[in-house]
Image (tube, rainbow, N blue to C red):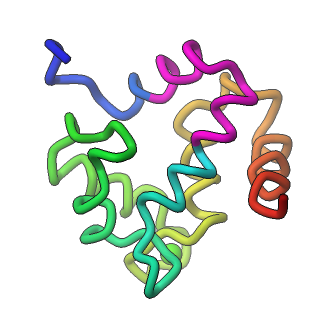
Amino acid sequence: MANSSISFEDFLPSMAEQLGPEGLMEELCKGFNLLMDPRKGVITFDSIKKNARAFGLEGLSDDELMGMIKEGDLDGDGALDMNEFCTLMVRLSPELLKGPQAAIDAVLNCFCN
Ligand SMILES: [Ca+2]
């Protein structure tokens, strides 16, 4: 990747464009599993940094990764659970999907399958 200044806000729409909505939801589900700390079942700064490459996020700086956690951490425990991760994804790119609730439902369905 020649463009090292890609931001997360740019990253998700470009991924959605390549994959389509259904493919994107699958990637978000896989993404959560890849990024989370398997012992804790949540995404932490350490787990996201360790696994960023698997999710295609290696272009993001520590500050951007930490920003993702802070941005999405609704209950202030310093980590992202599945709901927080999905909510963050939807908030970052609401135009990708029909609506936040539809997106969250789709992700939850994906996890339940
Ligand atoms: Ca949290």
- Residue 96 in picture, x, y percent from top left: 67, 24
Q: Residue at x 46, y 85 (%)?
A: 40
* Left or right: 5 in relation to 91: left
Above or below residue 26? Residue 52 is: below
Quarter occupied by the N terminus: top left
The C terminus - image quarter: bottom right
Q: Which residues are magenta?
A: 12-27
In percent of width and height, residue 54 lies at 34, 46
Q: Nearer the viewer, residue 67 or 112?
A: 112
Q: Quadrant of residue 50?
A: bottom left
Answer with the quarter of the image where residue 7 lies: top left
Residue at left 58%, top 40%?
27
Q: Residue at x 53, y 61 (%)?
A: 33
Q: Is residue 45 above or below residue 72?
A: below
- The secondary structure that dominates the magenta segment is helix
Q: What is the total number of numbered labels drawn onto the structure image?
A: 0
Where residue 14 sits in the image (x, y, percent)? 47, 17
- Give above or below for 101 relative to 3: below
Toward the bottom, the furthest residue is 39
Q: Position of residue 108 (x, y in %)?
A: 79, 58
Residue ID at (74%, 50%) = 107
